[in-house]
Amino acid sequence: MRQNAVRAESLIDKPPKNPKIVRGAEKGILPDADLEFYQKEYERLVLELEKEMERSVLPETSDAKADLNDLLIRLRLKEIA
């Protein structure tokens, strides 16, 4: 059964498929960066996200703002009591 969610946790502890993709400091500088490779990889990932967005049955925007606001108010009032 296909899930309508991204399973980021399944990607965290796996080694990258391509040795050019390495873990490091966020927003760090890539030494000897292969810009062509990273540009192609970025474009591939954007296309994959767009394809999944088209397949998704999730709404484009949420209409639960009022419900969320009500929940937060009730939780905050519960903490005060």
Image: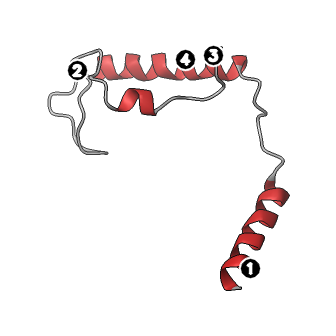
Q: Is residue 39 left or right of residue 49?
A: left
Closer to the chain start, of discs 1 and 3, is 3
**Dots 4, 3 in contact, CB < 8 A:** yes
> What residue is pinned by disc 2?
20
**Dots 2, 3 in contact, CB < 8 A:** no
> What residue is pinned by disc 4?
48
Is residue 69 positioned above or below 43 on the image?
below
Rendering quarter of residue 67: bottom right
Tag 3, which secondary structure?
helix
Q: Which mark is residue 77?
A: 1
Tell me the CA gap for discs 2 and 3.
25 Å
Tell me the CA gap for discs 2 and 1.
51 Å
Amino acid on which disc 2 is placed: Lys
> What residue is pinned by disc 3?
51
Residue depicted at x 31% and y 24%: 14
Closer to the chain start, of discs 2 and 1, is 2
Closer to the chain start, of discs 2 and 4, is 2
Amino acid on which disc 3 is placed: Lys
Tag 2, which secondary structure?
loop
Residue 36 in the image: state x and y as whole percent.
Answer: 31, 17
Residue 30 in the image: state x and y as whole percent.
Answer: 21, 35
The total of numbered circles placed on residues is 4
Residue extending farthest left: 32
Residue depicted at x 38% and y 21%: 39
Residue 31 in the image: state x and y as whole percent.
Answer: 15, 33
